[in-house]
Image (cartoon, grey):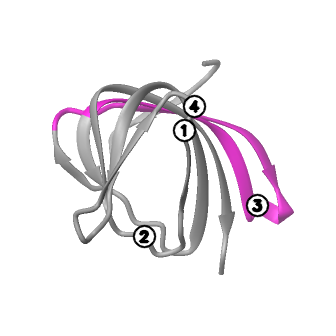
Amino acid sequence: MVNPTVGKPRRPMEGDTVHRTVTAFEGNQGRASSGIWESTAGKFRSDTTGYIEFGYILEGSCRIVDPDGTVHNLNVGDAFVMPEGFKGHWEVDEYAKKVWFISETN
């Protein structure tokens, strides 16, 4: 990735996770964006309050766990949508890379 933003999860649960993100597109007056995201191993909470996210797994694998405990296993080639207000968590065993598109809802 060229000139990624490197950081840690905002809501960590387990591990010493590192994220790398590149935003490739911004539009609709900043209300829509897309890019590439990578994560090392770890477990961290998600909160999509105010936006909807579409993702597509490019490399690695991970799980998205719903608040009720339902597990969604994601592997290379899998697409997913995280609805507005989703408050589950991610589990990455080794590495995951996705392309993402976010549309703000408010």
Mark drawn on residue 60: none
Q: Secondary structure at mark 3?
A: helix
- Amino acid under label 3? Gly
Task: Please state which of residues 34 and 79 is positioned toward the viewer in this rendering.
Answer: 79
Q: Nearer the viewer, mark 3 or mark 1?
A: 1
Q: CA distance from mark 3 to mark 4?
A: 28 Å
Q: CA distance from mark 2 to mark 4?
A: 22 Å
From the viewer's perspective, is residue 20 above or below residue 65?
above
Q: Residue at x 59, y 69 (%)?
A: 51
Across and down, in percent, residue 105 comes to 66, 76
Across and down, in percent, residue 57 comes to 53, 34
Label 2 belongs to which residue? 86
Q: Residue at x 70, y 45 (%)?
A: 34
The image quarter in which residue 47 lies: bottom left
Q: CA distance from mark 2 to mark 3?
A: 21 Å
Across and down, in percent, residue 10 comes to 33, 53
The image quarter in which residue 93 lies: top left
Give the mark nearer the N terminus: 2 vs 3. Answer: 3
Q: What segment is highlighted magenta in the picture? A: 15-41
- Amino acid under label 1? Asp
Q: Nearer the viewer, mark 2 or mark 4?
A: 4
